[in-house]
Amino acid sequence: MNEPLLCVQLESAREHERKAISREIHDELGQLLTGLAFEISWLHRKLPAENRELVERIKGMKALVDAGIKGVQKISAGLRPRHLDDLGMRAALDWEASQFANRTGIRCTQAIDISDSDLPPDYAAEIFRIFQEALTNVARHSLSTDVAISLKHTRGALELEIRDNGRGISQHEIDSPCAFGLLGMRERAEMLGGKLRISGNHGTGTTVTVTIPLEEEEIRQHAYPDSR
Ligand SMILES: Nc1ncnc2c1ncn2[C@@H]1O[C@H](COP(=O)(O)OP(=O)(O)OP(=O)(O)O)[C@@H](O)[C@H]1O
Ligand SMILES: [Mg+2]
C-alpha cells in the first residue's frame, strides 16, 4: 500500500477512535451526574430552610455536580451499558425509563414493540445510547411533564421515537455546532446506516426520531462491509 494512503487511513482510524471515546465519556458520566444533580435537588427541597449551614453545603454540592457535568462533556469511560448486557434491550429500556420517571417525576409512557432477537447486539448498544441521551436531554432541558417512547419495527426499519411535551427545541439549538449530545446521537444513527430527526415546536415539545434500516441485506452489509 502506498504511504500517503496508509497515513490517511491511520488518521481516519484515529479520528474514529477519538470520536468514540468522546461519546463514551459524554454518555456514561454525563448521565450519571445528571442523576446525581436530581438527587441533590430532592435533598435540597426536603431540608428545613432554617438549617442554613446544611442548605449552603447542598448548594455547594449542586454547584460541584454542575461543574462536573460541564467537565465530563469532554472526558471518557468506555463501557457498554451494563443493563443492556445483563438484561437485553427490551428490559434495559424499560428499566431506564422507570428510573428516569422516578428520578425526574416526568411521566413516561412506553410502547416497545420489538423483541431482542430483532436486533444485532451492536445495534442494541448504539440505540440504547441514543435513547439515554434523548432522555437525559428531556430531563435537563425540556421542562416537560410527559414523555412518550416508542420503539417498533416497521417496513424493514427500526424506529425509535422520544416525544416530550416541553418547551420545544429551537432550530438554532438543533443547528448549533456545540450540540455534542445531538451530534453524538446523529453519528450513532449514521453508523448504523440510519437517520436521526429532531423537531421542536415552541411550547408543545420536542420529538427525536431515529430510523435504522433493518433489512437482511443492510445488516449483512454492516457486518461485512467488504462484501459489496
Ligand atoms: N428535549 C429537549 N427540549 C428542549 N431543548 C432541548 C431538548 N434536547 C436538547 N435541547 C436543547 O438543545 C441543546 C443541545 O443539546 P445537546 O444534547 O447537544 O447538549 P446538552 O444536553 O446541552 O449538553 P451535552 O453535550 O451534555 O449533551 C441543549 O443545550 C438544549 O438547549
Ligand atoms: Mg445532551
Image (cartoon, grey):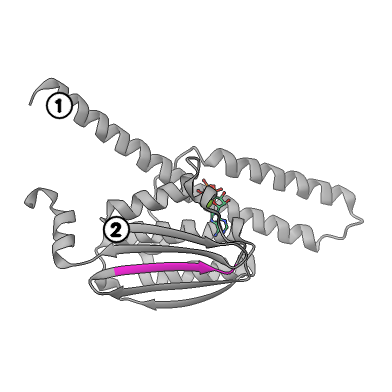
| Left or right side of 6 for 107 | right
The kind of residue on which mark 1 rests is Leu
Residue range of the region highlighted in magenta in the rendering: 158-165
SS for callout 2: loop
Q: Residue at x 63, y 70 (%)?
A: 145
In which quadrant of the rendered view does residue 63 lie?
A: top right
The kind of residue on which mark 2 rests is Gly
Location of mark 2 (residue): 194
Q: Is the stretch drawn in magenta largely helix, strand or loop?
A: strand
186 in relation to 160, above or below: above
Q: Residue at x 47, y 44 (%)?
A: 180
| Residue 63 in view | yes
In which quadrant of the rendered view does residue 159 lie?
A: bottom left
Whether the residue carrying mark 1 lies under 8 Å from ligand 1 is answered with no
Picture coordinates of residue 175, whole percent (x, y): 48, 46
Q: Residue at x 13, y 21 (%)?
A: 3
Picture coordinates of residue 90, whole percent (x, y): 38, 72
| Left or right side of 222 for 202 | right
SS for callout 1: helix
Q: Residue 73 magenta-drawn?
A: no
Taking the view exactly as shown, the residue that stands out farthest to the top is 3
Q: Residue at x 48, y 38 (%)?
A: 75
| Left or right side of 88 for 182 | right
| Residue 87 in view | no
Estimate the spatial distance between the alpha carbons at disc 2 and disc 1, rounded to whole Å: 28 Å
- Quarter of the N terminus within the rendering: top left
